[in-house]
């Protein structure tokens, strides 16, 4: 059955990566780690998209996760990567829980732009805060793993494997979640909320739960990204960051939990190339690419893949 | 006979429109009640108020003695009152089978925390069989097995009506409100469809209220008739008596006295 | 029109930039400064109309049949593209054209100097707002537009050229955005990113006022403006925050905004 394939593929990929990892060049490890981080955020977006909700403000939680991780180092001297991810995810999820009371009542354009507005508030607050470095942000401590500080050559690999492990766990959990009645409610909410209510379920509560999960995942992704990049700044809450996540989500499609990570990797490659080619117009390239995707490949790249698999 | 649903003095206005005016009716357990009346008379409003979609300005509804006036639709569904819609409310992009699975999933979820995590094999409370079997069973009861893998939005009108009613039956309600179950169905098929629906439904011991415009269907299947006009109930009697009522003849059936 | 148009913000930015460039060129040639106000308007029209026509026809038109989320994403993509186009054409340095603003001077109100230009802004807002209201409710074309917005299928069945109305609406809406940008240009430094701030603010206004309600938008704008000025004056740190706080409060009390339109019956 298709279900088993996903689990086996994901686990195999992880093992392969863990084994082959040390031989990868540093820049490749960096790109992959960032891809895992972004992929986590997009995994959350996927949950919301399946219910028909487009969040233009996941950068809010991404940024919260990053700043929490950074704050751990800056104010408490803690640099353990798993603690950072856990705290980042928890702070983000808690915020999503509170904000969800407002947001879960809305759909469509209200939901999208309200989420955007909230992320821009955070941006504004961070820019004005001197203690957190204002527009410059601040650097994050080099990571430790369960109390051990890896040697300089091993740091990237350690971060990569941790990222992959967390991504694997998240993907498997979400995959499992999508199999439950609550997970299967998403397309129903998208199609006909009145029917959902009349069958005895609360669409609002379901959306609230999905929003919290998406927020938590984005927070973990943010903490991870901060660790990989080594620096945190308010730009992480800016609307363009949310736009990148949306782009990856559209690129990947909602077909499978592995899609966000593959999409993030492809995006990372495209972004680097576009930026190298012309730093002043990479937004234009992004927008143009997004437009082309929407018009020609609305189901994302994954739909190509699944079509291929079905034929072979 | 015990009263299962008791409406007392329901009033509802939307601006200048009076949708319900002192509507009172005591529905007895296990009965089949027909709701008749012209368009805009207040039949669907009555159903909407009973199921919690609209809150009345005044008045109350009691279900098995318990006041349900202020409850939202999902709470009322969980208590055992379900409805079908004038325009079938389906999950368009899902197959008929998946439509049923969503409904069964909600039942599982409502049954308890374990329902959140259930996969596929767990027996559904009230049916004692796994979800997929229950879905097939219900689809079969309403003659929809052939349509099982077709998307709801491409189903023909009659099948959509039946799927809508099947969805209403998933939660094993004790009261079923059907809003124009045979509308859009050809006259020859109306009787057969109504018989199929009532057979499928009454086997579970369900009290049925149905809105109907075809007086022959009403005469044939209803034990009692509530006639609506202008937001009021103008007649409440057995079908023969109700249809002979002068106001009903004038306002509902359309005959001059 | 039931589409969410993130590109609206871009038109605001483009209007501001076009106005800044054209006015600067106008003044540099020594033409009468008093006519620079007309230049603002002309700049907005010249730049907004062609852009809007092209965008609606080439990009939006084929996608109306799709999910409403698609339109949202498309206008978002266009927004991204236009932000960079603006940077390409005008560069990243700020533009200042203070002359139209400074020219009118200021007058004394309650012991403080109030710039006369702001009165021009208010007058313009009233003129265009009133004009739009008259257009929609007082003219036949306007009423047809309302019908088309409510139900394009039925309108089409009655012989209305729905495509043309959509085009006209989009162009008109974008033009208004560009005009807003043009009129604002003399009061601020025109920089990239103008569009973003305004789209987020406009959203707050529309939400507070109620989707689809013109008087609501006016009230919402007034509220947002007042609240913002008050907070800038008394508590500058919470300036951004306070508007969304107001929005959250309004939404909590009236989920559809202050003046929402009646909802048609669903079931």
Image (cartoon, coloured by chain):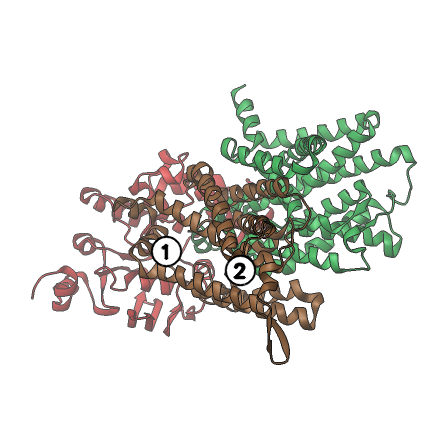
Chain colours: A green, B red, C brown
Give the image location of residue A44, x and y in percent.
63, 45
Q: Quadrant of residue C80?
A: top right
- Is the residue A110 above or below the residue C83 in the image? below
Q: Residue furthest left?
A: B257
Chain designation of label 2 = C
Binning the other alpha carbons within 10 Å of mark 1 as few (below 14), some (14 to 19) or many (20 upward) gives few
Label 2: element kind: helix
The reply to whether the C-beta atoms of the residues labelled 1 and 2 are less than 8 Å apart is no
Q: Same chain for marks 1 and 2?
A: yes
Residue under mark 1: which chain is it in?
C
The residue at 39%/51% (across/down) is B168
Q: Nearer the viewer, residue A112 or A155?
A: A112
Q: Which mark is residue C266?
A: 1
Determine which of the numbered discs, if any, sits on residue B27 in the image. none
Nearer to us: label 1 or label 2:
2
Q: Is residue A298 above or below residue C21?
A: above
Instruction: Measuring from the top left, give residue A185's x and y in whole percent.
Output: 52, 47
Q: Residue at coordinates 70% horizontally, 34% vertically from top-left?
A: A275
First in residue order: circle 1 vs circle 2 = 2
Residue A89 in view of the camera: no
Report the quarter where the N terminus of chain B lies: bottom left
Q: CA distance from mark 1 to mark 2?
A: 55 Å
Q: Position of residue B102 (x, y in %)?
A: 48, 45
Residue A42, picture quadrant: top right
Residue closest to the eye, C116 or A120 = C116
Q: Secondary structure at mark 1?
A: loop
For this orientation, the residue located farthest to the top is A312
Q: Would you name the residue on which mark 2 appears?
A: C34
**C254 or C238: nearer the viewer:** C238
Q: Is residue C52 visible?
A: yes
The residue lying furthest to the front in this view is: C30
């Amino acid at each position: 059955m298709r279900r088993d394939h996903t689990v086996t593929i994901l686990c195999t990929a992880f093992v392969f990566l863990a084994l082959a990892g040390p031989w990868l060049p540093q820049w490749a490890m960096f790109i992959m780690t960032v891809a895992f981080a972004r992929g986590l955020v997009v995994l959350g977006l996927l949950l919301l998209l399946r219910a028909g909700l487009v969040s233009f403000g996941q950068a809010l939680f991404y940024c919260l996760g990053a700043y929490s991780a950074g704050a751990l180092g800056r104010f408490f001297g803690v640099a353990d990567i798993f603690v950072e991810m856990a705290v980042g995810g928890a702070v983000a999820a808690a915020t999503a829980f509170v904000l969800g009371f407002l947001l879960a009542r809305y759909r469509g354009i209200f939901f999208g732009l309200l989420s955007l507005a909230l992320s821009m508030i955070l941006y504004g607050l961070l820019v004005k805060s001197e203690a957190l470095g204002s527009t410059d942000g601040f650097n994050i401590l080099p990571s430790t793993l369960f109390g051990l500080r890896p040697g300089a050559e091993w740091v990237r690999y350690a971060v990569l494997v941790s990222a992959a492990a967390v991504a694997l766990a998240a993907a498997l959990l979400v995959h499992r979640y999508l199999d439950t009645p609550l997970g299967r409610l998403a397309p129903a909410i998208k199609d006909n909320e009145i029917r959902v209510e009349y069958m005895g379920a609360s669409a609002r509560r379901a959306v609230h739960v999905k929003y919290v999960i998406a927020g938590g995942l984005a927070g973990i992704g943010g903490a991870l990204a901060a660790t990989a990049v080594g620096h945190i700044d308010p730009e992480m809450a800016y609307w363009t960051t949310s736009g990148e996540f949306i782009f990856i989500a559209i690129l990947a499609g909602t077909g499978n939990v592995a899609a966000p990570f593959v999409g993030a990797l492809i995006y990372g490659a495209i972004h680097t190339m576009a930026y190298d080619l012309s730093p002043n117009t990479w937004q234009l390239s992004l927008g143009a690419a997004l437009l082309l995707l929407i018009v020609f490949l609305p189901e994302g790249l994954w739909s190509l893949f699944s079509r291929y698999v079905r034929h072979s | 006979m015990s009263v299962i649903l008791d409406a007392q003095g329901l009033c509802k206005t939307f601006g200048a429109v009076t949708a319900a005016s002192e509507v009172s009716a005591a529905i007895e357990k296990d009965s089949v009640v027909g709701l008749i009346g012209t368009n805009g008379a207040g039949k669907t409003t009555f159903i909407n108020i009973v199921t919690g979609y609209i809150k009345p300005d005044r008045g109350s509804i009691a279900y098995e003695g318990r006041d349900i006036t202020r409850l939202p639709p999902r709470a009322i569904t969980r208590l055992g009152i379900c409805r079908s819609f004038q325009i079938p409310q389906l999950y368009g992009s899902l197959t008929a089978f998946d439509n049923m699975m969503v409904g069964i999933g909600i039942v599982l979820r409502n049954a308890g925390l374990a329902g959140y995590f259930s996969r596929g094999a767990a027996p559904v409370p009230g049916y004692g069989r796994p979800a997929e079997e229950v879905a097939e069973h219900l689809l079969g009861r309403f003659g929809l097995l052939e349509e099982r893998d077709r998307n709801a939005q491409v189903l023909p009108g009659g099948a959509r009506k039946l799927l809508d009613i099947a969805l209403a039956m998933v939660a094993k309600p004790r009261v079923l409100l059907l809003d124009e179950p045979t509308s859009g169905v050809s006259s020859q098929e109306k009787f057969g469809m109504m018989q199929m629906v009532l057979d499928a439904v009454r086997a579970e011991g369900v009290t049925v209220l149905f809105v109907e415009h075809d007086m022959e269907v009403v005469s044939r299947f209803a034990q009692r008739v509530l006639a609506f006009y202008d937001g009021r109930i103008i007649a409440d009697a057995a079908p023969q008596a109700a249809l002979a009522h002068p106001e009903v003849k004038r306002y509902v059936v359309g005959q001059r006295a | 029109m039931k589409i969410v148009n993130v590109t609206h913000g871009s038109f605001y930015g483009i209007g501001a930039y076009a106005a800044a460039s054209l006015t600067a060129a106008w003044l540099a040639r020594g033409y009468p400064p008093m006519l620079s106000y007309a230049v603002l308007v002309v700049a907005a029209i010249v730049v907004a109309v062609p852009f809007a026509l092209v965008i609606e026809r080439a990009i939006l038109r084929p996608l109306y049949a799709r999910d409403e989320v698609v339109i949202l994403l498309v206008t978002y993509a266009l927004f991204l593209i236009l932000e960079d186009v603006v940077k390409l054409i005008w560069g990243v340095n700020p533009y200042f054209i203070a002359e139209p603003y400074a020219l009118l001077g200021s007058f004394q109100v309650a012991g403080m100097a109030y710039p006369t230009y702001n009165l021009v802004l208010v007058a313009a807002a009233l003129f265009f707002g009133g004009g739009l209201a008259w257009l929609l409710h007082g003219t036949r074309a306007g009423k047809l537009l309302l019908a088309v917005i409510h139900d394009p299928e039925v309108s089409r069945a009655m012989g209305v050229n729905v495509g043309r109305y959509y085009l006209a609406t989009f162009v008109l809406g974008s033009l208004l955005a560009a005009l807003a940008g043009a009129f604002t240009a003399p009061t601020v430094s025109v920089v990239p990113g103008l569009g973003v701030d305004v789209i987020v603010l406009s959203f707050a206004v529309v939400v507070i006022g109620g989707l689809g309600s013109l008087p609501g938008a006016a009230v919402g704008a007034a509220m947002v403006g007042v609240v913002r000025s008050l907070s800038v004056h008394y508590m500058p740190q919470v300036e951004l925050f306070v508007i969304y706080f107001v929005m959250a409060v309004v939404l909590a009390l009236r989920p559809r905004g202050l003046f929402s339109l009646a909802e048609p019956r669903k079931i």
